[in-house]
Amino acid sequence: MPKKSLKEQIQSIEYRDADTEDFDDIIDTTPEKVTSSAKNKITMLPLEKLVEYKDENFEKIAGRPQPFREYSQEDLESLADSILKHGIITPIVVRPFGIDQYQILAGRNRTRASKICGLTEIPGIVRKDIDDVQAALIMIDTNIEQRQSLTYSEKAYAYRMRLELIGQQGKRNDLSGSEKTDSLAEVGKEHKESRRTVAYLIRLTHLLPELLKLVDDGKIAFKVGVEMSYLAQETQEYILNTIIPSGGKIKAGQISDLRKIEKYETLSEEIIQRVFQRQNSISPSLTISGTKFQEYADLFKNKEEIERLFLEFLKAYRYQQRSA
């Protein structure tokens, strides 16, 4: 069977309801240039020589230079207080970059907080002899490992970026004759996620950024967001700008109906409104105790007869009200 491309792997998954570093004994506190050839040796790095990681192509897609969000000012100040009390517990990870500079692969917020503290240097590990793909993979993996809680969008963009990087590595593997791998499963195994979960998270990156933020904030359910990611951009824009501001709650069934219709025709504003109005309308129900019907038992043969007579009464009552 021919190997599916990464794009085919992701698209084939339909929606269903359903490098840790060891720092012991390698600390070097000499505040000089990095001269060690040891891969994991820790040295003190001047803050003025550090530049943050930035991927311009990724920024065009996600609106930020890397998958992981920046700390708020409040969070940075809290981290700065911790650094003043306890120091930098986990060294940052960098690589040589440009002329006498280092690019931060992991530790952007620690670096910013250190500047708030008035520090001039920070402990770090310099990773030499790595290319752009390896640097990006280190940036992604170390951030996922070290951060306690990640939003849906952070994981989604991190996994998407990682898959694209694996795809670039795969092209080189093809040249060397290495066996291809299941990229989605590989990412899931690396980060203890199922293949399906990785695919669902990546689908979220096809949402408008504003809708994805609503998923992060818990205002749109994760599974509803995944389902919505299949809708055309114009449909997503209408839901964002018209349906949500009107106070309508987005339900999985509504999005599912829109997807079915969109397979055969372009969704107009009228169709979208009709779908949401239909499913948001409340169907009234009525329960009456059987003892209250005993007086009229001779009129009712069965449940269907009760329903028929009740509906006839409602029609007559409506006519009476309109005629009054």
Image (cartoon, helix red, strand yellow):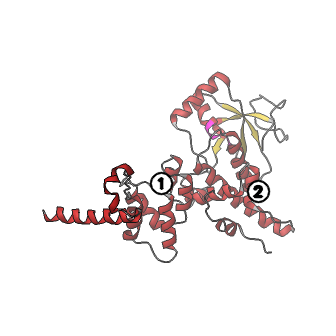
Q: Can see residue 177?
A: yes
Would residue 242 be found to the left or right of residue 30 on screen?
Answer: left
| Percent of width and height locating residue 44 | 73, 32
For label 1, the SS is helix
Q: Return the residue found at the far left.
A: 324
Front one among 57 and 272: 272
Q: Amino acid at mark 1?
A: Glu
Q: Return the residue found at the far bottom.
A: 264
Q: Amino acid at mark 2?
A: Glu
- Is 264 drawn above or below residue 39 in the view shown? below
Of mark 2 and mark 1, the one earlier in the sequence is 2
- Is 140 drawn above or below residue 204 in the view shown? above
| Percent of width and height locating residue 145 | 71, 42
Magenta residues, start to end: 104-109
For label 2, the SS is helix
| Percent of width and height locating residue 113 | 59, 33
Q: Is residue 150 magenta?
A: no
Pointer 1 local density, CA inside 10 Å: few below 14, some 14–19, many at least 20? few
Label 2 close to label 1 by CB (< 8 Å) = no
Q: Is residue 106 magenta?
A: yes
Q: Measuring 51% from the left and 71% from the top, which residue is drawn there?
A: 260
Q: Measuring 73% from the left and 53% from the top, which residue is drawn there?
A: 188
Would residue 255 be found to the left or right of residue 92 on screen?
Answer: left
| Percent of width and height locating residue 7 | 67, 68
Q: Measuring 45% from the left and 66% from the top, which residue is drawn there?
A: 235
Front one among 159 and 94: 159
Splitting the image into 4 quarters, where does residue 52 fall? top right
Residue assigned mark 1 = 210
Residue 71 marker = none
Residue assigned mark 2 = 186
Q: Can see residue 232?
A: no
